[in-house]
């Protein structure tokens, strides 16, 4: 006898309730998605508790399922600790079996050290206070724990050389950051490749990219700009992003060459830090 596992988190309970109300209305995920003007994949993610609908989607759900504001009101108990445009990614990456990330000018958030994260947040938050800044740093460090596990997700990291050469936080901070990335790669926790400047133009030159794969759901892709982010779950868009990642990866240095490059640049930063300290 198979016993169905009960939802554990508020998000899972939200999704389970949505599934029950949809079934009671006699609708498939495809039919509900059509009425909500979204994909069946998105409905599937909501029902699995991987993602939450935004307020507009929740209002449409209440309208279609005739639930009198039930799903809209429930969102108030699920306030996010992250920017709204990024919250869906946070929810999804916890369920991912494979992550492929590309850093154009920054080391991706999951790999960042505390000092590097602090320097990044300080750079685009003028007149920042200590308490809010500490909160941002803590959140990012909590995210990074996802890759401290020995099991899933499988992690691929592709870095443009620009992300290695931009001195974020100073030479000491960069030396520590690059050593962390190299240590994780050497330990087999992530697959590391670097796109050196000598590779010229490549398929991901204009954007960061985050790809997530799942055991029981369709893959998604995420890109981000200043104060905005876009999560894609339409198959054609996701496939185009996957293709771009594969193309860029084909222009990258090998794992061994990439690791050696990161180690070498880390030593350059370490030397520069010691020189500055001796002055």
Image (cartoon, grey):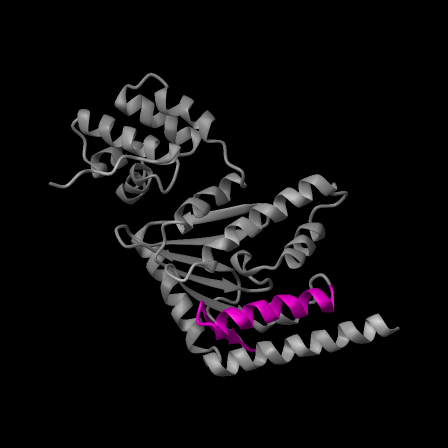
Query: Which span of residues is magenta-colored?
Result: 170-197
Occupied quadrant, residue 15: top left
Q: Nearer the viewer, residue 171 or 89?
A: 171
Q: Position of residue 4 (x, y in %)?
A: 20, 38
Main SS category, magenta section: helix
Which residue lies at the image location 28% right of the left edge and 45% below the top edge? Answer: 41
Which residue lies at the image location 57% right of the left edge and 52% below the top edge? Answer: 141
Q: Is residue 205 left or right of residue 32?
A: right
Q: Is residue 55 left or right of residue 45?
A: right
Q: Position of residue 247 (x, y in %)?
A: 40, 72
Q: Is residue 154 left or right of residue 85?
A: left
- Looking at the image, the residue that sits furthest to the top is 68
Q: Position of residue 26 (x, y in %)?
A: 16, 28
- Looking at the image, the residue that sits furthest to the right is 279
Q: Quadrant of the N terminus?
A: top left
Which residue lies at the image location 56% right of the left edge and 50% below the top edge? Answer: 140
On the question of residue 190 being in view, the answer is yes
Occupied quadrant, residue 16: top left
């Amino acid at each position: 006898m198979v016993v169905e596992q009960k939802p554990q988190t508020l998000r899972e309970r939200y999704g389970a309730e949505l599934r029950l109300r949809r079934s009671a209305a006699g609708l498939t995920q495809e039919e509900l998605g059509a009425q909500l003007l979204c994909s069946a994949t998105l409905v599937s993610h909501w029902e699995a508790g991987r993602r939450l609908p935004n307020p507009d989607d929740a209002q449409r759900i209440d309208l279609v399922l005739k639930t009198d504001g039930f799903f809209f009101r429930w969102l108030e108990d699920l306030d996010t600790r992250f920017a709204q445009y990024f919250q869906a990614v946070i929810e999804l990456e916890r369920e991912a079996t494979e992550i492929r990330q590309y850093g154009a000018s920054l080391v991706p958030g999951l790999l960042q050290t505390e000092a590097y994260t602090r320097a990044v947040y300080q750079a685009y938050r003028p007149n920042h206070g200590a308490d809010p800044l500490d909160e941002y740093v803590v959140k990012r460090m909590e995210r990074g724990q996802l890759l401290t596990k020995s099991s899933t997700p499988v992690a691929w990291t592709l870095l443009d050389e620009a992300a290695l050469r931009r001195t974020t936080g100073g030479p000491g901070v960069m030396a520590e950051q690059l050593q962390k990335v190299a240590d994780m790669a050497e330990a087999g926790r992530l697959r590391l490749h670097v796109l050196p400047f000598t590779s010229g133009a490549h398929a991901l030159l204009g954007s960061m990219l985050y790809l997530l794969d799942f055991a029981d759901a369709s893959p998604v892709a995420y890109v981000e700009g200043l104060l905005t982010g876009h999560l894609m779950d339409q198959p054609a868009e996701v496939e185009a992003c996957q293709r771009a990642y594969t193309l860029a990866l084909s222009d990258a240095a090998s794992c061994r060459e990439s690791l050696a490059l990161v180690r070498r640049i880390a030593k350059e930063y370490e030397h520069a830090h010691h020189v500055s300290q001796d002055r």
